[in-house]
Every structure is written in structure tokens, then in C-alpha cells.
Image (cartoon, grey):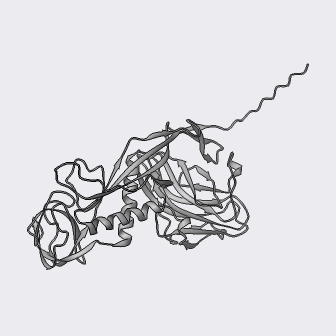
Amino acid sequence: MKIEIDKFISLTGWTPQSGSTISAYALNEHKNLIANNQSYSVVFKIPEGNLNKYIEKTISVDLTGYNEVVFSTWSRNKSRDSYGKAADYYYKINFGGSDSYYFGTSKEDLKSVQIGLTGAPITKIRITALHNDEDYIVMSYMCGVLEEMPYDLYVDTKAALETELYNVYANGFLTGTVTAAAGASSVSLLTGTANYLERYAVIKIKDGTHEETHQILSTDESTFKFTSMYDGATLLYSYTGANLYLITPVEFNPDSTEAVFPGIKIWNMAPEPEYRGSALENVFDTFKTDTTATVRREGGIQKYTLLVDCEARHDQMLAFLSMIVRKWIAKQTLWCNGMKLGILNEGAPIEPEVTEASMYIPKIQYTFSVEVKEEMYNRVTAYAAITDYLNLYIS
């Protein structure tokens, strides 16, 4: 699970240190330098001569219940192949406490940064340059994270598919208008047609002030009664001539709720281990100004295989949902907990055939896989050596 700290989609609120010429320079729109499907990221300009100078922004986020901060960054001029000690870093970040944390940058692509920070309130984001050269750095999507797999994969896959749907239709398919009073358990069409508005379909009612979402329990093709799902069995607000939209929800593991048609369902199989790389690896992911470092132990690679069902009673809606899933899988990227993961299409989509005399719901199934390294233990602090011993044996 995660909590947003800063999306880095605005230039406002950033203040440079007195004597510093560092600035929140521009909004970046290049998608390969934007994390988590945001609209923008922030470009900071560091002119020559800003050694140990900073720029900061005041915020207020409670990280109780989370154990790390994750964000993405890129540098135009400053990067290394590896970072083994505090002196290797070109930037550090402070969140309002006494500790500052060094973070690595990359010139090739966005670099994901993980910082162990447990239960501390964040009161600022301060970025300090540890060099005297000109540079431009990009900062994108900072969040607090407590890893919960595979739940986190479900949540972020759902969010990614909902983003694809929103990009094609912001509200849904407009079917007509309705007028009804708050507390009503049904609505009737004033104008429009009832195409695709059947039992288990989900509708959105929206005017210029309010909106709400309901699932259809029953209908006579002009009046629609609701189930208890989404915003409940009765209207929350009164409407006069409000627009009524058919929407296509994305749900994961919906085996204990009412069916949703048309809609997209995400199902998960148990992960399987990938036997390559280190089974247990110590990662030094946080170097602080007091020269200590925190270490997390990652486990072996786990491959999660997810099944995505497109389900609809009508071929036109089924084709639409299938197109949405294809568009997303083709991007081969899933942002999960602020980290960029690659996704792999697993074979051709399947259109299951009817195997017995039962109610048949047309569907198209897509399968894709995601590989993650799950953290095995809590972070520990590793202290720098303060005494060196050299033993010489002469014979």
C-alpha cells in the first residue's frame, strides 16, 4: 500500500536557500521521465556554484504505518554506475528531521530510489546539491510505501486500466438523462435509450454539482433499480435532467460480490520463483550524513501471473474492453508502489467456449506476468567502521 507525498506536477511552493540559484525550472512532459502515469514531473536547474545549496518545499504527510519513501529521479550530467559510499553521491534529500539521505541519479532513464523511513511525519522536501557544476535533475512521484504483495499488484493494475479507460472516455458512455429525488431506490430515463443498461451493469449519474455510481439490480428498460454495491441502493442526491452514463468498472478477485457486466476483472495465481540472480541479497539503499547506512534484504525473484477477464453480454462492449486491455499490456509497464515494473504478455488472448448448459457470459481473457523482488526482513542500520587494523606477519 502507499500514500502520496508529492506528485511533482507543480512548480509552485519551492523556495531556494538564501544565496542559492537553484530553481524549480520547468515542468517535464516527456513520458519516459514521468513516474506513475502522472501528467508532469518537475525539472530543477542547478547552476554552477551551488555546492551544498538547497531548494525546499513545505508539506505535511504522516507516514505512520509505512516503512519507506519511494520516488524517481534523473540527472542530465551527474550519475555513476554504482554507489558504494556517501562520498559517491551528487544529491541528498531531507524530510524535515535531523537526518539527510543521499540518493543516486541516472542519465539513462528514471532511477527509482527507496529510502528507509519509518513512522516519521514529513514536513518538507529539501534537495541539496553536493557538487559545484551545472546540472538539471528531474523529480517525479514521491510516495510512502508498505509493501503488501500481491494486493499492491492488484491495486496498481486496477488503477492503470482505469487510467486507460479514462483516456478513452472520461465519464463513460452517455445513454440519456434522468430526474430523481435523493433517497430514491430507482431512476427512470427522461431521454435516451436503454442500450446495454441491463442487470448487473454499472451507471454513473452526473450533473454540474454531484455525481454517484450505482449497479442495476433490475430494469424494465426504462426504470432502473439499484443493488447495494458502489454508492448503495438509494440515490445520494437529487437530480434534474442529469446525465446518465454506462461505465465499465475494473475489479480484482470479485468472487464474493455481485457480478459486473460489462466490466474488467483481475485474477491472480500464486507466484512462482524465478531461479536467476541472488536468492538473498543485501541492498544498501540509504546513506545518511552521519555516514551510517540502512540495509534491506531482498528475496529471490517472484513471478506473478495475472489473468484479466473482459466480460460483457454484447460483442460491441466486449471488443471495446478488449481494446483497452491490449493498449495497456502493449506498454509493457506497471507502476507499483512508485516502482517501475516490466510486464510480459503470456501467450495469445483466449475466448472461452461454452462447455455446459448454463448461463453464458461472453469473455476474452488476457494473461500477463510481473516479476518483483519482495523484501524479506526489516531494514537494519549498518554503522561505518571507525578503526582500521592492519596486521603484518614477517617471516
Q: Position of residue 358 (x, y in %)?
A: 16, 51
Q: Position of residue 199 (x, y in %)?
A: 15, 62
Tally the marks. 0
The residue lying toward the viewer, choosing from 224 and 356, is: 356
Q: Position of residue 330 (x, y in %)?
A: 46, 62
In the figure, is residue 30 to the left or right of 158?
A: right
Corner quadrant of residue 190: bottom left
Residue for point 35% across, 67% down: 165
Q: Residue furthest top?
A: 395
Residue for point 35% across, 63% down: 322
In the figure, is residue 82 to the left or right of 167?
A: right
Q: Residue furthest right?
A: 395
Q: Residue furthest left?
A: 220
Residue for point 57% across, 50% down: 98
Q: Position of residue 149 (x, y in %)?
A: 41, 44
Q: Does residue 275 sit above or below 64 in this rendering?
A: above
Corner quadrant of residue 360: bottom left
The residue lying toward the viewer, choosing from 311 and 142, is: 311
The residue lying toward the viewer, choosing from 39 and 171, is: 171
The residue lying toward the viewer, choosing from 88 and 383, is: 88
In the figure, is residue 340 to the left or right of 368?
A: right
Quadrant (top left, top right, bottom left, bottom right) of the C terminus: top right
